[in-house]
Amino acid sequence: MAPTERLTAVGDDLAADVRALWGRAHDEDGVAAVSEAFALALGPAREGVVHLLRRSGDGTLVGYGQVSSAGTADAVAELVVDPPARRAGHGRALLDAALAHGTRSVWAHGDLDAAQALAAAGGLTRTRSLHRMTRPLTDADAQDPALPDGYTVRGFRPGPDDETWVRLNAAAFADHPEQGRLTLADLRERMAQDWFDPDGLLLLERGGRVVAFHWTKVEPEAVASHAPGMTGARHGSGEVYAVGVDPAAQGHGLGGPLTALGVAHLARRGLAEVELYVDGDNVRAQRTYERFGFTDAAVDVQYSLSR
């Protein structure tokens, strides 16, 4: 078996091959092959990012792995093997290479049987879960909720609101290992994506100060067949991308109205479904979403080495 390749940067042609592999894995497994942050890191060199490649005897790409924060105590990896090339040792080779780069944990999207077996074989145990919850959207969801007295809502203003949002997000997610670490550069990278819509990043204000936000996400193809304002059957899915509240404003009953604002925005776009991701140990948020009719659809699991 050929050795695992290690790269710090991925060119355009190879990146296209990797994305095609991700697509085949998604079609087979019914879940995303990698998370957004790992997908965004596919390309030019980034500090702490290592790309791992597995090829067949004829040189065809059959496996891909990525290590983030390589060489640190926070090193984490995601691994994908092309469905026709599975059960041939490529997954274990990618895992071994990731561990050699200091990986302490690996995400398993969908927590499939093969991922569970690979984690067990590598001595990793389940340490965290991320639930994907969904609910259908109807015309009745399109009405904005009443806000508590003194609160107003508006859309995000690229440029003037950038640093305000980064500070608020850091405060709201101070204990979150990924979301709370987003920088101004991370925000602007996401603003450069074709799905970004400033009107879909809703800011809640009180006394002229931004105290909470609901960021929605809609991939362009999700609304291609149903433009805003059209009537008729609903199509596509939108996402509750992130919901954050300033710690000083928590406990003021903002969770429900804030969730409903984003749901209403997505409903007005003619979408048929809304989805979100929530940590398994965030019981309070899960209960809020359940009251809005969200139910579990899938779960991603993080497997880690013993400290």
Image: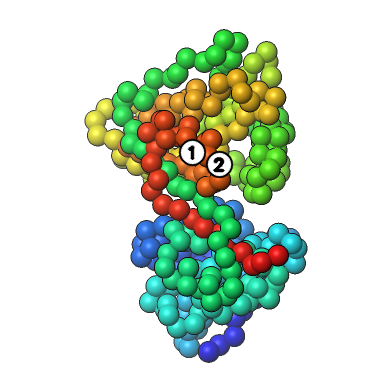
Q: Position of residue 239 (x, y in %)?
A: 46, 40
- Write down the quadrant of residue 6 in the picture: bottom right
Rate crowding at label 1 as few (under 14), some (14 to 19) or many (20 or more) other CA atoms within 10 Å.
many
Please determine whether, in this image, residue 237 is positioned above or below residue 121: above
Image disc number at residue 286: 1
The residue drawn where x is 70% and y is 70% is 102
Please determine whether, in this image, residue 242 is positioned above or below residue 82: above
Task: Tell me how far mark 1 sits from mark 2, CA to CA.
Answer: 6 Å
Residue positioned most to the left: 232
Task: Report the side of 27 relative to 284 (left or right).
Answer: left
Rate crowding at label 2 as few (under 14), some (14 to 19) or many (20 or more) other CA atoms within 10 Å.
few
Residue 47 or 70: which is nearer the viewer? 70
- The total of numbered circles placed on residues is 2
Q: In this view of the protein, can residue 112 be seen by the observer?
A: yes
Q: SS class of the residue under badge 2?
A: loop
Residue 98 or 7: which is nearer the viewer? 98
Please determine whether, in this image, residue 125 is positioned above or below residue 37: below
Q: In this view of the protein, can residue 156 be seen by the observer?
A: no
Q: Amino acid at mark 1?
A: Gln
Task: Report the side of 119 relative to 7 (left or right).
Answer: left
Q: Which residue is mark 2?
A: 282
Q: Amino acid at mark 2?
A: Asn
The residue drawn where x is 75% and y is 63% is 72
Tell me, yes or no, whether the two marked residues, 1 and 2, touch with CB atoms within 8 Å.
yes
Q: Position of residue 136 (x, y in %)?
A: 33, 36
Q: SS class of the residue under badge 1?
A: helix
The residue drawn where x is 31% and y is 29% is 138
Residue 99 or 38: which is nearer the viewer? 99
The residue drawn where x is 68% and y is 76% is 100
Q: Position of residue 202 (x, y in %)?
A: 55, 27
Residue 85 or 231: which is nearer the viewer? 85
Q: Position of residue 209 (x, y in %)?
A: 69, 19
